[in-house]
Image: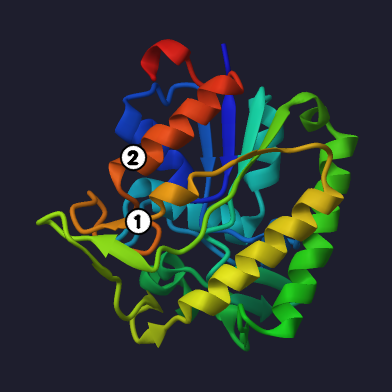
């Protein structure tokens, strides 16, 4: 039976949700960035035992794992047969603080943790800056070395290639422009610039990593007004998840009978 680890975002996790697949053998690592994964734990950070107001358990666990750097040990302990990488969560800025890095996700902003002394003096590294890209490329090289040096080298490695949708399907079935996009409230995003960044990330990752299986559904990259998580450039129409599920079945990551 397959045991799938996702190092990525909701676009990969939602394939299971929308296709009715079992999540009992699924590990989901999200709200992180490759540079943050390979950084050191933030000194003096004190996570709460229960999620702060406004956060659910899984998103809270994800942000705590990002700051305390427990995600990669979780992946190793899980002993996955398949590892899926997708880079849609690589849209958030990075925080440089006390000699380490963290991902400035919506969850971190919402949690109130940024008011802790541990984050005093934190400096933002903008995602579209040359500095952030250099950090990311260095971390991609570290990921390649990490995979080769651990049992992950025996897993089936999958790159789920995705982009921000530029159009959406309305509730009446019409195709329209997606309009203004925000990464965080009040922080607008340039869809074209982020898609270009994703293309560079993926090309570099494929060049550095052991052989990867690439899955993608460019014909169905259409945002969905009726998506359960709301309208977003990476909340796609159902046909997108159907096609990705079909490709995952071909790689043995999910059961063909459920497709």
Residue 126 sits in quarter: bottom right
Q: Is residue 174 visible?
A: yes
Frontmost residue, 193 versus 81 = 193
For the point 90% across and 37% down, the residue is 149
What x and y, as percent, mark residue 125?
65, 83
Q: Is residue 7 above or below residue 200?
A: above
Residue on which the image places disc 2? 239
Task: Residue lying at the far left in this picture: please name it.
Answer: 172
Residue 98 sits in quarter: bottom right
Residue on which the image places disc 1? 222
Q: Is residue 44 visible?
A: no
4 relative to 54 in the view: left or right: right
What x and y, as percent, mark residue 147?
82, 39
What x and y, as percent, mark residue 130?
74, 83
For the point 68% across and 79% down, the residue is 96
For the point 44% across and 22% down, the residue is 24
What x and y, as percent, mark residue 61?
47, 49
Circle 2 residues within 10 Å: few <14, some 14–19, many ≥20: some
Q: Earlier in the sequence, mark 1 or mark 2?
A: 1
For the C terminus, which image quadrant? top left
- Element type where label 1 sits in the image: loop
238 relative to 197 in the view: left or right: left
């Amino acid at each position: 039976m397959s045991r799938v680890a996702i190092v990525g975002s909701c676009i990969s996790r939602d394939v299971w949700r929308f296709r009715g697949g079992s999540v009992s053998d699924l590990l989901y690592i999200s709200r992180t960035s490759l540079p943050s994964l390979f950084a050191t734990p933030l000194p003096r950070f004190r996570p709460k035992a229960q999620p702060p107001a406004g956060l659910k358990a899984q998103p809270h666990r994800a942000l705590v794992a990002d700051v305390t750097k427990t995600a990669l040990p979780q992946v190793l302990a899980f002993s996955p047969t398949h590892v899926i990488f997708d880079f849609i969560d690589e849209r958030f800025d990075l925080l440089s603080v006390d000699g380490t890095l963290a991902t400035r996700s919506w969850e971190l902003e919402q949690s109130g943790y940024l008011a802790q002394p541990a984050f005093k003096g934190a400096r933002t590294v903008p995602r579209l800056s040359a500095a952030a890209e250099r950090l990311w490329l260095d971390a991609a090289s570290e990921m390649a070395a990490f995979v080769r040096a651990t049992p992950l080298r025996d897993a089936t490695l999958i790159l789920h290639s995705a982009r921000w949708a530029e159009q959406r399907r309305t509730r009446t079935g019409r195709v329209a422009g997606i309009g203004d996009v925000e990464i965080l409230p009040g922080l607008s995003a340039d869809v074209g610039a982020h898609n270009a960044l994703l293309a560079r990330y993926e090309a570099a990752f494929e060049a550095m990593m052991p052989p990867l299986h690439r899955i993608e559904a460019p014909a169905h990259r259409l945002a969905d007004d009726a998506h359960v998580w709301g309208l977003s450039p990476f909340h796609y129409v159902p046909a997108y998840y159907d096609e990705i599920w079909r490709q995952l079945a071909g790689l043995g990551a999910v059961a063909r009978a459920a497709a």
